[in-house]
Amino acid sequence: MDMIYRRLGRSGLKVSALSFGSWVTFGNQLDLKKARECLAAAWDAGVNFFDNAEVYADGESEKLMGQAIRELGWPRHEYVVSTKFYWGIYETRRPNMRKTLNRKYLMQAIDGSLRRFGLDFVDLVFCHRPDPETPVEETVFAMHDIISSGKALYWGTSEWPADDIRAAWEIAERHHLHKPVMEQPQYHLFERRRVEVEYARLYEDIGLGLTTWSPLASGLLTGKYIDGIPEGSRGSLPAYSWLRDKLTDPKANAAVKQLKAVADGLGCTLAQLAIAWCANNPRVSTVITGASRPEQVRENMKALEVLPKLRDPEVLARIDAALPKTK
């Protein structure tokens, strides 16, 4: 099935419905050669959006992606690349450069990312988390200046509460500044409330677009953790030990077994069903996928073939019936 392209919210920019991200893998599981192979597989499938962040592998992810893209020889006008700021990557006891969205940090962070990527500009830049210690006005003005400088083309947020997104948008509206265009929230079968309830008013009110992450719930929705944590999986990595309780949760894995039965009935893998389910939400501009092997990339892209099957209300009802009931 050919790639589908969707507008990023109300902007004129179009991104592939399935995109490719580097969290966890680049610099942790993948070297340059494997990163290049995965990027090439995504590109061949029609992916045009590649997600990254300053903090991923402490900047190494941006370096790997930038070098791989140069070696692949992609025309700059044909791909969309992102970065995200908040956590910082400098080891220091002094303030201003970690867990912040203050002006000093943001203006220096964009320059650092561009150096690591080897690019003149990134297409999308996200405020990776809200910063309660920095006035929203300061952050909005700094992001406006980054866009106006040409170092990024659109800005948005990641995991911000709806009220904070609206506040930032209204400040930009009032002062005729570049407005936040997109949000990057976690969204998957076990994590739905923010996208489907909290942000509901923002789609029409401000034209918010979504670049959602973790469609497989960090691998839980692949079914690989039903019998424990396999060697070499994300759950086995020391840096991601905090995920282990979620990945081995008995109730979640019981639901995964039922969802696998639905996937089997549709003739697809559980992962393809989970990715397609996210992409089936019309509010989602793009679903960020990840992989450690090009074969995984190609398998994930086949989720596009599952999309038409999710038009059947009975299929969606079976999916909902398999999920744990929430109060």
Image (spheres, rainbow, N blue to C red):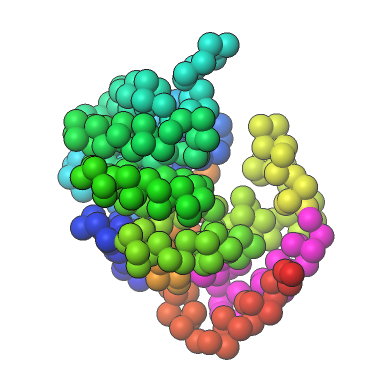
Q: Indicate whether residue 181 is drawn in magenta.
A: no
Magenta residues span 249-277
Image quadrant in which you'd find residue 238: top right
Magenta: main secondary structure? helix
Whether residue 182 is visible, yes or no, is yes
Q: Residue furthest front?
A: 174
* As drawn, 240 above or below 63: below
What residue is shown at x 72% (from left), y 51% (from top)?
Answer: 247
Q: Is residue 40 left or right of residue 87?
A: left
Among the 4 quarters of the image, the one containing residue 145: top left
In the image: residue 215, left or right of residue 282: right
Quadrant placement of the C terminus: bottom right
* Closer to us: 274 or 193: 193
Q: Residue 152's x, y, as percent?
A: 26, 37
User: Number of marks in the image?
Assistant: 0
**Is residue 267 part of the magenta span, yes or no?**
yes
**21 or 202, nearer to the observer:** 202
| Left or right: residue 133 compared with residue 72 | right
Residue at image x 50%, y 39%? 129
**Residue at 46% across, 66% down:** 200
Image coordinates for residue 165, horizontal then vertical, percent: 42, 50
Q: Say above or below: 88 vs 304.
A: above
Q: Does residue 93 appear left or right of residue 255 in this picture?
A: left
Seen from the viewer's position, the closer of residues 33 and 135 is 135
